[in-house]
Every structure is written in structure tokens, then in C-alpha cells.
Image: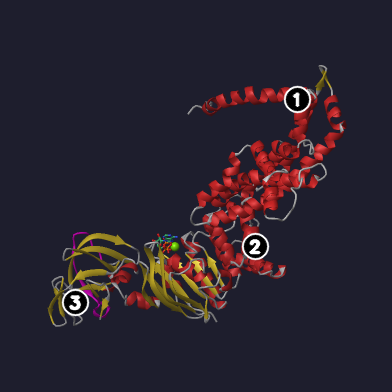
């Protein structure tokens, strides 16, 4: 049983605040993905959970035990470091075995675990090499294997697959998910890659500037972003935004069309995902002028001008469109979202 | 860039070394294996058959064997402590480095002024009423105290040189390795022993070679504290050159010191060798 609870954790480096009071609970065996732009505090949060950094405020609990005063080795965690930290003076085998040796595990069991994890990460043929003889991606897999070999209750992974090519990453990703599910490990996984986040996560926590902006399952984060930041960060291409002008109670004027919206007095923006638009008869929907056409195979991405703003739509690749064409884009009504202009928060 | 440019740039330094080092060195080397204008090992026979040679050799080795390990442990400990400091690191480094700026003869004299019969140690003990009479520490009747005083003075004088090298070496080890070891369950001691020490090998090599060679050349501190009570290889070289006026035997002694230094350098290089693939 290893539930992780983070209660009001804040971290300042001198005058700079890297984390502002983070609250988060990761249930036992959950696969939590931390997603956020560079510098938003993901590594800092992992290091606090690992015990490599002391929080300025707040508490960390693992498996019902308060751990923020305990050294890393007493927290029952293993970690994959963002910069690998594969020991240069040890072979790949001894690197993977490092944690097991510290526990004075019998040699046979060490052998078994090292070979199993190396196989999983496709690095069995590298076991005798030193890290100086490995590529970045191989080193990264050694770092992952070293953490897996511990068979920990909690595994913290800081962008563990960032250096692999697309194909290998895809493969490792599913292997990793399989192994961790099987071993009943609670995992926190940091990534920049939203596709990776969506495909791995039981739950995604989106961070921005030292805050957790939203923590929800992948589909929820995608469909109902809690804030404009999340809407823009998740989804490729990102969500479209258009200014909305209030014309009556719960009525808005968006790019020359009348739309029903939330009944509120705050100034809000209209938002719709590019794939939630369909081509409509002229006069129904948003009037758009195509600027760029990018065929993507199954779909075609068009970038248009709508009411002077840049606006993207994903349409069927059979629709023959050219730059300069005028389109009418009809949004699926239940997919329209609204965000407060000032706070950026979602408005229902 | 022309291919010969690097060699051209190294030329002045090379010429300087040849004239002022290689030439006199060869002279001494030749001198040690010639007597009366003929090739012979007579100088070495004369040197080694003298009763003081064995004594000098034994004392030199004993001093090195005592001083270097003590300094190694102390400098590693001090460097680790200094490395951890948040503030005042350079100030502490400067303070530790002060003895480095003092010549070995001056260092010997400083410790002599502590240990001699009318020295600080006796005045302090008498002042505190712990002893009635000043004690004669550095006498031929108590060679162990002389040895102790010399070891103390040497440790005091030359630990900092090792420490400075090790501090620099520690600074080169990225922090993440220690952190990884910590996360994977290494205790403080295991972290030091399994991660820091192996990664420190290149600096340890430098520090040890430097220190061991200096230990075989120990001279002024021994003379200041032990006088003629404790012959060492270097003092015997001096003795043959200036008191006994036999340059050939002095040259033979110099060659012995050289041979011992080279031998130990090779041993240290070998023992602390880092295979190319295991370097960072
Ligand atoms: N030791 C430190 N001293 C001062 N500032 C720090 C320190 N460590 C991190 N920071 C700052 O804290 C912020 C968060 O850093 P962190 O490493 O957690 O970012 P990250 O989300 O992991 O970014 P990336 O995705 O680029 O790895 C950054 O602005 C960084 O500059
Ligand atoms: Mg990071």
C-alpha cells in the first residue's frame, strides 16, 4: 500500500518560488503523469517526494507515513533521474544492481532481477559496458532498469523516455505501463509529451508556474480543461479561442454569430477544439477564410482567419480546400467551452 | 593552422627544460655510475655498504608510510567537510593552506620551538602545573618522540596540498551521482566508498603521487627536529655532497631517491587506474 499525499507543499529557492502550495493525492497503484512546460516545477516536486529537496512548507506522506523528515532510502521509492545519473565507474550490470547490492540481496536474485529488467528495456547485450560507451537513449534505459530492479512501492520517473526515438519510445511506454501495473507500483511520471501523458496516465496533473492547475483523468483534461492554460497546452493543435461579446442574458456574439453561453457577468472567451468543427452550409456557423492547408493523411489541418483571429480546424481530407477559400465552420454545440478572460478559469 | 605550429609553440619550454633540467640531470646520473672516469657501480656499493644507508632508507620509508596514510585520511575528511560548507568555503581553504606557504625548514623550526626543552609545550605544561621540570623530548634516548614530532610537523605542513587537490576533484563530481546513490539506499559511508572514492581516483592519483614524492624528499623538517639522530635519504645525500665531499656517492643517493619515487609513482598509477571507458 503506497498512497502518496502531498499537503500544501511549497518550495522557494531564495526569493524565487518554484512551487506554490501544491496539494495532491496519488492513490495506491495509480499511474499519475505530471505534465507541464519547462521550468514549471515538475522536477522540484519529484525531488521533494524523493527526499532530495526539503520543502519550504507542507507535508509529504507515503503509505500513511509522514516522510518529509526521512532520508530518501527510508521512503521506499526508486527514481529515474532526468539526467540519468548512471554511474560512470560501474558497468551497466552493476548500475542496475546498485540498489540491490545496497540491500545485500543474494547474488542469484540480483542476477535474476538485473537480467529481467535489462531484457525489458532491451539492453541485455549492454550489461558489460560502461556508461561512457552508451548512447543517451541507452543510458536512459539503464536508469529506468535500475529503478525497476528495486521493485519499489513508489517509482518516480523524470522524463524517462525523452531521449528515445519515436518507435522505441512507443514500445518502452507500453512495456513500462504493463510492468508497473503488474507489480502494483504507484508511479509518478513526468513528461513534456502530451501524447505520452494521455496514453499512460490513469490521471494527469497539469502544472503551470509552480501550481497544479488541473488533476483529472486524461479524457476529462482533454474535454473539460479547467483553465485556458490547460486547453492551450493539451491537444495538438491546441484549442481555438475567440472573444465573445455579451448581448443578453446567456447570449453572446462570437465572430458575427449568435451563441448561447453561460449566464455570467464576467468577460469570457469562447473556445472550441479544431476537431470539434464540421463544414457547414454558408451562413451557418463561423465564417472563415483559409490561409494555410496542411494535409495530415487521415485529416487535413486548415488554419483560417475568423473575425481577424487565427483559427484552426481539422477537416476530412476528402474535402478539397485551397488557401483563399471561404468556409463555414459549425462547432459541435456540446463541445464549446468558455474561459474567464481575466482569471483564465473555465466558466460553466 | 600549419601542422608544426603546436611544436613550434612548445619549443621554448622544451629548450628551457633540456638546458636547465635534462642536462644537469644527465650529469648527475652519469656521475653516479662513474668513478675515476670509468663506468662502475662503486658509488652505489660505497653508499649502500655504509651503515647509515640502511638506517636512512628505513627511516625515509617509515616516515612516508606513517605520514602519507594519515594525510590521505585527513585530507579526504577535511575536503569532504569543506565541500559541504555553504558559506566561508574559500576562507577555510585559505586558512588550511597557510602552512603551504611556509618553507619546510621554517616549519621544522616552528615545531622545534614547541618541542625543545625551553619550548612552548614545556612552558605550558609547567605553567599548568602538570609537570615540575621541563622535559627533554627530542633526545637520542627517545627516538620515538623525535619520529612523532617529525610526523606531526609533516602532517601539519603538507596535508593542505592534498586537500586542495581533493577539494577540486570533489567539485568535479556531479551532485546527481551522490543523490542517485542516496535514493538507491546507500548510507553516507557507502556513498563515499562506492561512489565518491572511485570517481575521485584521478585526483587521488595526483595528490598521492605528489605527496609520496615529497615524502621521499623529506629533509629540512627532519634536520630541524632530529638533527643527526634520524638520518634520511635526503640528509645523507646532503652529507655526502657537502660534509664528506664525495659527489659520486651523493649522486648515487639521488638516483636511489629517484628510483624509489618512480617505482611508487608507477604503483600508484597502476592501483588507481581508471579504464578509459569508465571515465566520465
Ligand atoms: N537549486 C535551485 N536553485 C534555484 N532555482 C532552482 C533550483 N532548482 C530549480 N530551480 C528553479 O525552479 C524552477 C522549477 O525547476 P524544475 O527543475 O522543477 O523544472 P521542470 O518543470 O522540471 O523543468 P524541465 O521540464 O525543464 O525539466 C525553475 O525555474 C528553476 O530555474
Ligand atoms: Mg525537470
Image spot of residue A152 (x, y percent): 58, 73
Residue B63 appears left or right of B78: right
Report whether mark 3 lies on the same chain as mark 1.
no
Question: Where residue B18 appears, x then y in whole percent?
Answer: 63, 24
Residue highlighted by disc 2: B190
- Which is more N-terminal, label 1 or label 2? 2
Q: How far apart are marks 2 and 1 (CA)?
A: 53 Å
Q: Residue A266 carries which label?
A: 3
Q: Under 8 Å from ligand 1: the CB of mark 2?
A: no
Q: Position of residue A217 (x, y in %)?
A: 40, 78
How crowded pointer 3 is (Cα within 10 Å; few <14, some 14-19, many 20+) is rated as: few
Image coords of residue A307 (percent x, y):
16, 66
Residue at image mark 1: B242
Direction from residue A209 to residue A122 in the image, left or right: right
Disc 2 and disc 3 on one polypeptide chain? no
Magenta-drawn stretch contains A329: yes
State which mark lies toward you, 3 or 1.
1
Amino acid at each position: 500500500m503506497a498512497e502518496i499525499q502531498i499537503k500544501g507543499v511549497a518550495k522557494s529557492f531564495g526569493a524565487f518560488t518554484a512551487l506554490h502550495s501544491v496539494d495532491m493525492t496519488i492513490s495506491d497503484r495509480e499511474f499519475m503523469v505530471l505534465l507541464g512546460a519547462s521550468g514549471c516545477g515538475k522536477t522540484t516536486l519529484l525531488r521533494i517526494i524523493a527526499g532530495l529537496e526539503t520543502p519550504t512548507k507542507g507535508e509529504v506522506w507515503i503509505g500513511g507515513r509522514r516522510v518529509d523528515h526521512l532520508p530518501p532510502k527510508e521512503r521506499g521509492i526508486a527514481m529515474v533521474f532526468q539526467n540519468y545519473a548512471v554511474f560512470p565507474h560501474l558497468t551497466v550490470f552493476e548500475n542496475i544492481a546498485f540498489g540491490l547490492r545496497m540491500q545485500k540481496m543474494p547474488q542469484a536474485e540480483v542476477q535474476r532481477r538485473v537480467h529481467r529488467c535489462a531484457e525489458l528495456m532491451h539492453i541485455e547485450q549492454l550489461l558489460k559496458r560502461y556508461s561512457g560507451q552508451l548512447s543517451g537513449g541507452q543510458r536512459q534505459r539503464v536508469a529506468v532498469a535500475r529503478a525497476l530492479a528495486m521493485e519499489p512501492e513508489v517509482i518516480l520517473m523524470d522524463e524517462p523516455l525523452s531521449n528515445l526515438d519515436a518507435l522505441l519510445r512507443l514500445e518502452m511506454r507500453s512495456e513500462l505501463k504493463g510492468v508497473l501495473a503488474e507489480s502494483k507500483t504507484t508511479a509518478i511520471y513526468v513528461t513534456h509529451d502530451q501524447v505520452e501523458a494521455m496514453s499512460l496516465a490513469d490521471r494527469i496533473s497539469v502544472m503551470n508556474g509552480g501550481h497544479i492547475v488541473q488533476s483529472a483523468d486524461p479524457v476529462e483534461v482533454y474535454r473539460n480543461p479547467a483553465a485556458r492554460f490547460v486547453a492551450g497546452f493539451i491537444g495538438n493543435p491546441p484549442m481555438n479561442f475567440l472573444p465573445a461579446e455579451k448581448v443578453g442574458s446567456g447570449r453572446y456574439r462570437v465572430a458575427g454569430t449568435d451563441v448561447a453561453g453561460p449566464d455570467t457577468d464576467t468577460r469570457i472567451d469562447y473556445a472550441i477544439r479544431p476537431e470539434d468543427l464540421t463544414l457547414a452550409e454558408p451562413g451557418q456557423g463561423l465564417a472563415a477564410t483559409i490561409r494555410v492547408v496542411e494535409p495530415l493523411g487521415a485529416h487535413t489541418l486548415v488554419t483560417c482567419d475568423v473575425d481577424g483571429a487565427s483559427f484552426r480546424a481539422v477537416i476530412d481530407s476528402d474535402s478539397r480546400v485551397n488557401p483563399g477559400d471561404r468556409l463555414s465552420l459549425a462547432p459541435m454545440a456540446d463541445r464549446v467551452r468558455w474561459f474567464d478572460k481575466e482569471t483564465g478559469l473555465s466558466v460553466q | 593552422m600549419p601542422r608544426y605550429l603546436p611544436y613550434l609553440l612548445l619549443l621554448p619550454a622544451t629548450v628551457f627544460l633540456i638546458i636547465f633540467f635534462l642536462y644537469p640531470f644527465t650529469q648527475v646520473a652519469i656521475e653516479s655510475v662513474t668513478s675515476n672516469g670509468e663506468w662502475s657501480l662503486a658509488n652505489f656499493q660505497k653508499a649502500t655498504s655504509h651503515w647509515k644507508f640502511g638506517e636512512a632508507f628505513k627511516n625515509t620509508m617509515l616516515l612516508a608510510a606513517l605520514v602519507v596514510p594519515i594525510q590521505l585520511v585527513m585530507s579526504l575528511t577535511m575536503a569532504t567537510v569543506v565541500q559541504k560548507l555553504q558559506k566561508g568555503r574559500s576562507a577555510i581553504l585559505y586558512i588550511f593552506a597557510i602552512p603551504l606557504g611556509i618553507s619546510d625548514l621554517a616549519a621544522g623550526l616552528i615545531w622545534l620551538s614547541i618541542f625543545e626543552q625551553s619550548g612552548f609545550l614545556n612552558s605550558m605544561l609547567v605553567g599548568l602545573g602538570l609537570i615540575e621540570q621541563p622535559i627533554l623530548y627530542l633526545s637520542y634516548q627517545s627516538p620515538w618522540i623525535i619520529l612523532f614530532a617529525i610526523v606531526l610537523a609533516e602532517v601539519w605542513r603538507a596535508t593542505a596540498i592534498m586537500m586542495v587537490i581533493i577539494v577540486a576533484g570533489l567539485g568535479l563530481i556531479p551532485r546527481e551521482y551522490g543523490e542517485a546513490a542516496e535514493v538507491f539506499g546507500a548510507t553516507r559511508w557507502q556513498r563515499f566508498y562506492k561512489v565518491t572514492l572511485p570517481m575521485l581516483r584521478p585526483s587521488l592519483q595526483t595528490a598521492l603521487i605528489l605527496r609520496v614524492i615529497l615524502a621521499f624528499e623529506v629533509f629540512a623538517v627532519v634536520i630541524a627536529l632530529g638533527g643527526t639522530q634520524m638520518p634520511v635519504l635526503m640528509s645523507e645525500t646532503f652529507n655526502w655532497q657537502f660534509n664528506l665531499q664525495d659527489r659520486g656517492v651523493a649522486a648515487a643517493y639521488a638516483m636511489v631517491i629517484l628510483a624509489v619515487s618512480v617505482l611508487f609513482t608507477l604503483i600508484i598509477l597502476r592501483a588507481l587506474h581508471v579504464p578509459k571507458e569508465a571515465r566520465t
